[in-house]
Image (spheres, helix red, strand yellow):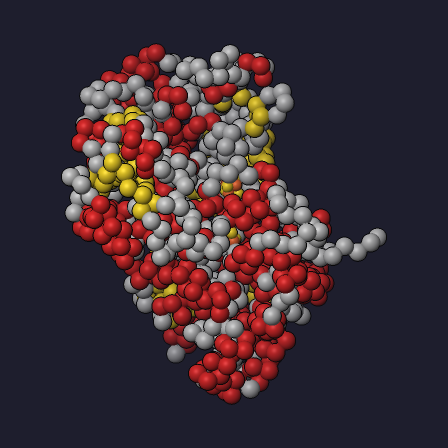
Amino acid sequence: MTKVPMTEAKVWPTSNADACIRCATCMAICPVSRVTPLFPGPKQAGPGAERFRRPGDPSVDSWIDLCIGCHLCDMVCASGVNISELNLLAKAKYLDEKGRPLRDWLLTHTYLYGWLGSLFSPVVNWLLKNSAIKWMVEVILKIDRRRQLPGYQSPTFRQWFRSHHSKGDRRIAYFYGCYVNTNEVEVGKATVEVLEANGFEVTLPAQECCGIPMLGNGDFKGARKMGLQNVPNLLKTIRSGSEIIFSSTSCGHMIRHEYNRLLGIPGSEEVAEHIFDLFEFLRNLKESGSLNTHFKELPLKAAYFAPCHLRSLNIGLPALEILRLIPGLQLENIDADCCGLGGTFGFKKEKYEISQEIGKDLKQAIDRSKPEIVLTDCEGCRLQIRHLTGLKVLHPVQVLRDALLQRTDEEMG
Amino acid sequence: MHFDLIVIGMGLSGLMAAKTASESGSKVLILGKGMGALCLFSNTIDLLETLPKGMKLDEGLSQWIKDHPQHPYSKVGAKIVEEALTSFTSLFPLPYSFVSAGDGNSLLPTGAGTLRPTYLIPTTMVAGASVREQGGLIVGFKGFKDFYPDYAATLLGCRSLTLPPFRTFHEEITAAGLARSMEKESFREEIGREIRREMGNETRVGFPAVLGVRDPWGVKKGLEETIGAEVFEIPILPPSIPGMRIFNRFKEWLVQRGVTVLLGHSVSKAILRGRRCEGIRVSNPPLSSFYSADRYILSTGRFVGGGLVANEEKIYEPIFDLPVSQPRSREEWFRKSFFSNLSHPVHQAGILTDSSLRPVDDKGERVLENVWIAGSILAGHDSTNEKSREGVEIATGYMAAKCAMKK
Ligand code: SF4
Ligand code: SF4
């Protein structure tokens, strides 16, 4: 069999651009074309431009790089056009031709040096906040200096877990993802503690970055490499009789859907059947009557924001359903479209303004609800909402943990 | 997951059904493939063209029902139609609410410069109803291709003004982009000043219906302050920003009530046993999820949303494979004269039901016991011709849920 280059359309899902009836519903929802005229919007960028794209010809659409990859257009299109996939393929082709800056490589390969960040976290975190360094980073790497790069934590989540002895009647495996490991260890701890409080012994399967940062930057090859490493490890876990949960909706969406749909990784179907969003899993426990609901009262006013990737998982809003069981917790669902960060998109100097402009709508929606804290399942959204509002932003599992565990503290104390 | 009721289809009828069932305390799942026709065509609430100004609703409806025994309104009945409309309008408290101009239809200007009869109007459009008599300035935007003010104004006997491109956008702008700009005070002031300069003796200003998504009344008030004249919206070509407002409001309400809302994936199959539906499969490759419920409402619309599909030979319903009432052959789909004023037979095609909106075959035998049908997929009406789109959706969505949730 001859090898076909990654970005040649025939390897990837076939285009169904012809299904487009040009109704323009997608134009009403696209967060990017709503804020900037530089991007013509999903109807034009996807099915519209598709008719002029030829595999051999050079790309004509330099604006394709502005698609943030939120999938919102796919969700509203009643004709089922795979708009964002068409965009991603065109973006990959365009960047393959144009070449990718070092900056993009750095932004998408944090898994390679994240451990270094953790190891030298005091120094690194100081450097990341230093304005001279930020200026240099902007000039040399074109990473916008107005954006605070995420700080590193030490020890990493995996290191912490090594000295943690998880106990329970049933086993559950946890795909924690890079960000939990080196930057938001607390989210990982809370996940483990909540699962244990429900009677599970938590295990950590061998894992690499899921590859979504590369995919978002049109680097199919890089993304596929990560998938090819992860799937066999996850399969081993599954075949030993354990289901897997994820706490990051972006990693989860990548593994559950893109590994198969876009990257065609062998075995990914079986993985998809056995990997669950953390709150989806908890909701299943609730349905079967085995969820630990011994919550203590938690007087708190919180706003919940459903990340784009959670929405494309199409499982509803399980975190909202579970958190609503906590007495005293006032929870408002924030009805906004997209946070605007788009993974690594919003870090790029040339895209910062667009990203902020999209985020403004979300900020206003949050301001209207006047919460004490904001909850959301995606690390990208958390970063962006902190940046936009200055509020405390947590993963919903952290609140759930507080409602569950402080109770046992009280009981013991 | 198991629910009391699953609503398939997220158009106006499905949303109404989900709302009605949720109010009765049921555990509801609503799923839709996309945002559907609501965000394309719906600006105002059409009920019936033959409801002239001054005619009472129940009077007009009763007459219609007498003349059209197979029409969805005849299954619902005039009283329930009114109840359903009240339930719909309760979602939109003042200031942005839906009102009728006394009894009967109002004539509202459209982006094409015509006057169109319709029943309930958003408060931001009310002042447009008298544009023919009282005149006004019709404003458009250069680079906004869905609305040509000169064209509309000439036909309506008004003056027009096309605003030059503003800083916020370049050569082209979409309805959504414009609606977003309208929500900014700075933008409103900028265009407001421009309009004020161009005002003659007009006392009102008509805009395309893009005065923001979230707070159209606030946008209208803001513009009125800078311009110093009354402002109103004119319904335009798809997509419809007023339709999005309706969609968003329903979604917000349903999520708040704990209804599970799944948008973006289609139901691939219904699992039937005998005359009962036992569950549905929803595909999101590579997965296919299973959901079950005691009862189901099908409100997937007609051809645009894929509720009905036509192949070479016939029209079919893809989820339950329900019998579809249709012309005997493709040749009979359209009348001889394509532009005939009479409805084409194909537009009357759809699912036949009994008086409780449960599907029946051509002999009138019930085919499924726990499935109800709502919205434009119902046979026996032609919403475009009758100007009954939203009315039929609201009434049958409400009625289907009432029947389905009856103990
Ligand atoms: S891609 Fe879908 S939503 Fe967009 S214009 Fe085409 S049919 Fe309509
Ligand atoms: S994926 Fe998001 S940003 Fe890209 S075209 Fe679709 S809606 Fe717009």
Q: Residue at x 19, y 51 (%)?
A: B226
| Residue depicted at x 15% and y 39% | B201
Question: Quarter holding the C terminus of chain A?
Answer: bottom left
Tell whether A75 sits left or right of A297: right
Left or right: residue A307 compared with residue B156? right
Q: Which one is nearer the viewer's eye here, A373 or B201?
A: B201
Relative to A369, is B82 above or below?
Answer: above
Please tell me which residue lies in front, A111 or B280.
Answer: A111
Give the image location of residue A231, x and y in percent: 69, 61
Q: Based on the displayed image, in which of its 4 quarters is residue A390 positioned? A: bottom left
Count of numbered tags: 0
Above/below status of B142 relative to B326: below
Q: Quadrant of residue B132?
A: top left
| Outermost residue, right side | A1
Any part of residue B246 in sight: no
Residue at horizontal 50%, vertical 34%? B305
Tell whether B85 sits left or right of A357: left
| Residue at the image position 22 percent from the left and 19 percent from the top | B55
On the image, the x and y values in percent for residue A121 come to: 53, 84
Image position, residue A349 (x, y; %): 49, 69
Residue A183 in view here: yes
Q: Is residue A261 above or below residue B103?
A: below
A160 shown above or below A53: below
Image coordinates for residue B395, horizontal then vertical, percent: 35, 28
